[in-house]
Image (cartoon, rainbow, N blue to C red):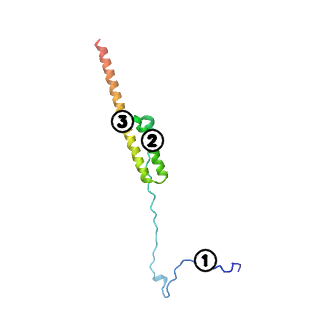
Amino acid sequence: CPRARGMQPSTHSYEVLPAGVNMEELPRSTTVTLEEPPPKPPRDHLVWSICTILYGNVCCLGLLALVFSVKARDRKVLSDYSGALSYGSTAKYLNIAAVVISIIIVIIVIIVVALMVASVSSYRYRY
């Protein structure tokens, strides 16, 4: 045989049945290993922060939201899901605050313009 001398063939790690035990007498079982799915990565709200910085950057809240969104994305890449969740929720609240303040400012501007138009039109009809 051309095998190298002194080398033993590989042995398998099978258990040897005790003498007098039949395979049909043993219980049949199957082991199934379930892997836990990876956790869903938290949202970083980056697109929302970019829209906020472009359209409603009140008191630089949009810029702050963008900074926290980028930090959340960095933490997500590093698989630090708790840090990503923290930065992502901060970015979300900053975006909400910026949008609410922007809506309030738009409503106030519309009311002021409407009142000015009404006062100018009523002033014109007096004379």
Q: Residue at x 42, y 47 (%)?
A: 88
How far is disc 1 from disc 3 in space, using C-alphas? 74 Å
Q: Residue at x 42, y 38 (%)?
A: 62
Which quadrant does the N terminus fall into?
bottom right
How far is disc 2 from disc 3 in space, using C-alphas? 17 Å
How far is disc 2 from disc 1 in space, using C-alphas? 60 Å
Q: Which residue is mark 3?
A: 101
Q: Which of the two discs, 1 and 3, labels the residue nearer the N terminus? A: 1
The three-letter code of the residue at mark 3 reads: Ile
Which quadrant does the C terminus fall into?
top left
The three-letter code of the residue at mark 2 reads: Leu
Where does the image place residue 87, in percent across and percent down from the top left?
42, 47
Residue 122 lies left or right of residue 16; in this view the side is left
SS of the residue under disc 3: helix
SS of the residue under disc 1: loop
Dot 3 crowding, Cα within 10 Å, few <14, some 14–19, many 20+ = some
Q: Residue at x 30, y 16 (%)?
A: 123
Position of 10 relative to 109 (above/below): below
Q: Nearer the viewer, residue 32 or 109?
A: 109
- Residue lying farthest to the bottom in this orientation: 20
- Residue lying farthest to the top in this orientation: 127
Q: Which residue is mark 2?
A: 66
Q: Are marks 2 and 1 in contact (CB under 8 Å)?
A: no
Q: Which residue is mark 1?
A: 10
The three-letter code of the residue at mark 1 reads: Ser
Where does the image place residue 55, in percent across and percent down from the top left?
43, 34
Where does the image place residue 89, in percent across and percent down from the top left?
39, 47
SS of the residue under disc 2: helix
Q: Are marks 1 and 3 in contact (CB under 8 Å)?
A: no
Residue 91 lies left or right of residue 5; in this view the side is left
Q: Are marks 2 and 3 in contact (CB under 8 Å)?
A: no
Q: Which of the two discs, 2 and 1, labels the residue nearer the N terminus? A: 1
